[in-house]
Image (cartoon, rainbow, N blue to C red):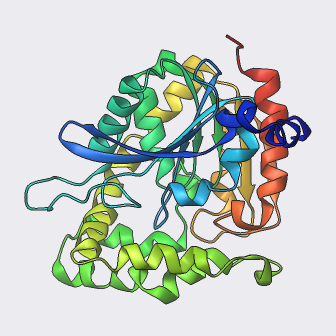
Amino acid sequence: MSNAKGEARTGAAADHLVVRHRTLEVNGVDLFYREAGRRDAPVVVLLHGFPASSHMYRNLIPELADRYRVIAPDYPAFGQSAAPDRKSFAYGFAIYAELIDGLLTRLGAERYALYVMDYGAPVGFRLALRQPDRVTALVVQNGNAYSEGLREFWDPIKAYWREGTQQRRDALRAGTTLNATKYQYIDGVKDPSRIDPASWVHDQALLDRPGNVEIQLDLFKDYGSNVALYPQFQAFFREYRPPTLIVWGKNDKIFPVDGAYPYLRDLPEAELHLLDTGHFALEDKGDEIAALMRDFLARKLPRP
């Protein structure tokens, strides 16, 4: 990181360290993404969770941009990406993976490491099933691919998968409120004063856009389609053995640590680090995660 700070003092020489904020149309949908780093550097793709956006990577991107080309997109109806009307656009994880695949192709990212968190895990692992030879490495942060990781928190959502009634749907609306969003940021965090309230205020402002809650409830329902793909995700791990770093907030109740250990069954050489924090581990453990990533990627990523 000292190199990045040194370059920053040289002015124009550090232009590649500047985070760019861009939008690109893919299959008729405007996708927003943050990008930094040299275009010829190894690519790292950061895939966000719910109810966040690429904003969650605002501090991590500059920590990686001196060595890597970093791309962090927003899914439709998240962050600054377009939010097509759900009457004409079928929101789900399959279309998210398709659109991110299209975005990366348009950006010339032919090979990439994936950082997957929360919703980013099924998006990223679906992307890996589509383009397995493009994945150079995985960084998994509180992102599930095993049934062991779906504990009590998921019971109301599982009920909605079984019975797609209005009553089951309405029971999940509380998960889109300010209290729920704040909870995701501070639960399990030893020192909540380290968490910037602007994080959950930012996310909630976007959740509160007209029609967005209904889109999120559609995605709660579609998440069950990811569980059906868990065996395929696991088969990808076993067959392709991507170098894998697991950095997991061990106090997370949404994706508890029970979901971290099973990765080692299929990826026995994966490096597992349990952090004393909650769901959005980057918010208070960002420096630690960045250091672990820089060490891991330096050892594992092929250089151009």
Compared with residue 103, is residue 303 higher up or lower down, i.e. above or below? Answer: above
Q: Is residue 213 visible?
A: yes
Q: Residue at x 31, y 54 (%)?
A: 76
Q: Residue at x 66, y 68 (%)?
A: 252
Left or right: where 14 falls relative to 88: right
**Where is residue 73 drawn, in percent x and y?**
45, 46
Q: Quadrant of residue 29?
A: top left
In this view, the residue in front, 228 or 248, is: 248
| Image quarter (top left, top right, bottom left or bottom right) of the N terminus | top right
Q: Residue at x 59, y 82 (%)?
A: 183
**Where is residue 107 drawn, in percent x and y?**
42, 26
Left or right: where 137 falls relative to 291: left
| Residue positioned most to the left | 87
**Where is residue 206 drawn, in percent x and y?**
38, 73
**Where is residue 233 drawn, in percent x and y?**
48, 34
Q: Is residue 269 visible?
A: no
Compared with residue 283, is residue 122 higher up or lower down, i.e. above or below? Answer: above
In this view, the residue in front, 157 or 122, is: 122
| Image quarter (top left, top right, bottom left or bottom right) of the C terminus | top right
Compared with residue 164, is residue 285 higher up or lower down, i.e. above or below? Answer: above
Q: Residue at x 40, y 36 (%)?
A: 126
Q: Quadrant of residue 3?
A: top right
Compared with residue 194, is residue 279 higher up or lower down, i.e. above or below? Answer: above
